[in-house]
Amino acid sequence: MVDPAHELGKTTGMARAIWSGSLSFGLVNIPVGLYSATQDKTIHFNQFENGTLDRIRYKKVNERTGREVDNAQIVRGFSLDGEVVQLSDDELAAADPERSRNIAILDFVEASEIDPLYYRNGYYLAPQGEGARRAYALLQEAMGHEAKVAVATLVMRNKEYLVTIRPAPRDHVLILQTMYFPDEVRSPREELPNIPAEETFQERELAIANQLIEAMTAPWVVENYRDTHRERVEGLIASKREGREIVLEVPPPAPKVVDLMAALEASVKAAGKGPDSTKATTKAKKPPTRANAARKEATEAPKRATRKRAS
């Protein structure tokens, strides 16, 4: 298999802070560093001209003249009512948020009140220096007892972020998650067609649907879920490298749902919870192996000999 971490240049060394400053609540300031909590394992491909090892590169060209333009000669513009308003980097700097090295907690809120749709990226906050550990641990412990998350703002890379900070008691760490602002989240009622609003269901329909959910309910074990597409791509790369032929598999046709109730009942039976699931859930007996047969014979032979002498 191809190691995507190697391909992406990931290192196994100690993580480096991508931002450092302080976390404050009230008059308490805690020096902290911000660390990436996740890593991108997507397999990124380069582009080549077919049949060669020549890389394909992109150039910035003037669409009218076709000539390449140097980066120093490029400014940004915004189309507004048919007019293009151009701004230089220096002019755009006037809108940059105030440079701050402080994450100031604004409020503590119930975690259940925040729709997960607002969350963006996750980071770890870690204390910077021995002197920060006790205050950091106290905040993490207190937030865990209160079951609250902190709401704050963070300025990073000339952008202001709304963030939440929550404790992860198992790892004794604070997790910071950037968030979307309210006007960045689309309203489904306004944006999406065919949203059901007045659908009604019979008790039997709801009962079967609930039964299916119960049959498919399992404890959350994150290791049970894998990026199967990435694994298949890794396998394709390995096969191609070894000179093996790539065979395209035709996916099976998607089943057509003709009757909702019939589909629900069939799904429940397949999950082993339906009235006819006894046969499906009964495990077939495996034929005895030679080793098992020998062990059984060694156990039964003395018993037979004892019974024979007794008779």
Image: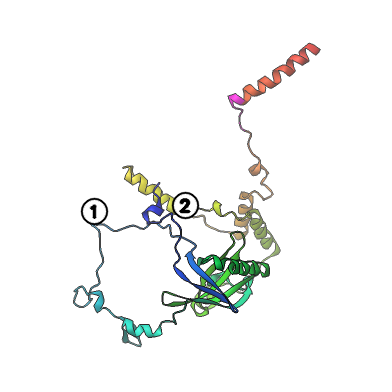
Query: Label 1 belongs to which residue?
Result: 53
Snapshot quadrant of residue 203:
bottom right
User: Does residue 248 show up?
Assistant: no
Residue 50 on the magenta span: no
| Residue 157 horizontal/vertical position (percent) | 41, 74
Start-end of magenta stretch: 286-291
Above-or-below relation of 284 to 251: above
Tag 2: amino acid: Thr
| Residue 233 horizontal/vertical position (percent) | 40, 51
Query: Label 2 belongs to which residue?
Result: 228
- The crowd level at tag 2 (other Cα within 10 Å; few <14, some 14-19, many 20+) is few
Residue 290 on the magenta span: yes
| Residue 229 horizontal/vertical position (percent) | 44, 53
Q: Is residue 56 left or right of residue 181?
A: left
**Mark 2 touches mark 1? (CB < 8 Å):** no
* Residue 169 vs residue 286, the one in the foreground: 169
Indicate which label's residue lies in the foreground, 2 or 1: 1
Above-or-below relation of 244 to 137: above
Q: Is residue 7 left or right of residue 57?
A: right
Q: Looking at the rendering, in which quadrant would you find the C terminus?
A: top right
